[in-house]
């Protein structure tokens, strides 16, 4: 279940485990599949850090995204401006800036919600 605030949605994927990380169909694409059936379909520049980006000394190579297999989501937020932030129990923070050129984001959780972002506009559909 999602919660809506003025500037963001708290995504209902907390506690889900990353069961697969695969390359997407686009050259810069990735698909993260979670244990609760949710999928994060990401295309474009991704940023992954150990700890919050504000205090992390450097971004990690995106190719290390596969190391998130088995990690648990502790926080997942989709901002209406298009930024998505997912924090894992490993301390990794995945950040996707939907306003960056060429970025496309889709997050689907069956029978719950569908979030999409293109050109910096985040949209949420609740599925009943």
Image (cartoon, helix red, strand yellow):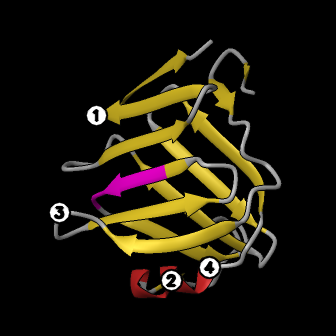
Question: Which label sits in the foreground, 1 or 2?
Answer: 2
Residue 11 spot, x, y in % from top left: 68, 36
Could you tell me what secondary structure mostly forms the magenta stretch?
strand
Residue on which disc 1 sits: 118
Residue 26: assigned label = 3
Residue range of the region highlighted in magenta in the rendering = 40-44
Question: Which label sits in the foreground, 1 or 3?
Answer: 3
Quadrant containing the N terminus in the rendered view:
top right
N-terminal of the pair, mark 1 or mark 3, is 3
88 to 13, vertically: above or below: below
N-terminal of the pair, mark 1 or mark 2, is 2
Tell me whether circle 3 and circle 2 mark residues in contact (CB < 8 Å). Answer: no
Q: Secondary structure at mark 3?
A: loop
Q: Measure the C-alpha gap from mark 2 to mark 4.
A: 6 Å
Q: Examine the image and state in which quarter residue 67 appears.
A: bottom right
87 to 3, vertically: above or below: below
Residue 104 spot, x, y in % from top left: 29, 45
Residue on which disc 2 sits: 66
Q: Measure the C-alpha gap from mark 1 to mark 2.
A: 24 Å
Instruction: Say few, some or many: other residues with alpha carbon within 10 Å of mark 2 (under 14 / 14 to 19 / 20 or more).
Output: some
Look at the image and say whether residue 32 sits in the magenta stretch: no
70 to 106, vertically: above or below: below
Q: Measure the C-alpha gap from mark 4 to mark 3.
A: 21 Å
N-terminal of the pair, mark 3 or mark 2, is 3
Residue 69: assigned label = 4
Question: Which label sits in the foreground, 4 or 1?
Answer: 4
């Amino acid at each position: 279940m999602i919660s809506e605030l003025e500037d963001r949605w708290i995504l209902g994927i907390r506690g889900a485990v990353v069961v697969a990380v695969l390359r997407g169909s686009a050259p810069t694409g990735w698909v993260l599949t979670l244990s609760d059936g949710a999928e994060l379909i990401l295309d474009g520049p991704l940023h992954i850090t150990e700890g919050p980006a504000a205090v992390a000394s450097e971004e990690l190579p995106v190719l290390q995204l596969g190391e998130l297999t088995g990690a648990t989501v502790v926080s997942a937020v989709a901002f209406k401006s298009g930024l998505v932030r997912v924090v894992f129990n490993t301390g990794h923070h995945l950040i996707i800036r939907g306003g960056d050129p060429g970025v496309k984001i889709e997050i689907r959780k069956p029978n719950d919600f569908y979030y999409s972002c293109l050109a910096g506009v985040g949209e949420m559909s609740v599925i009943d």
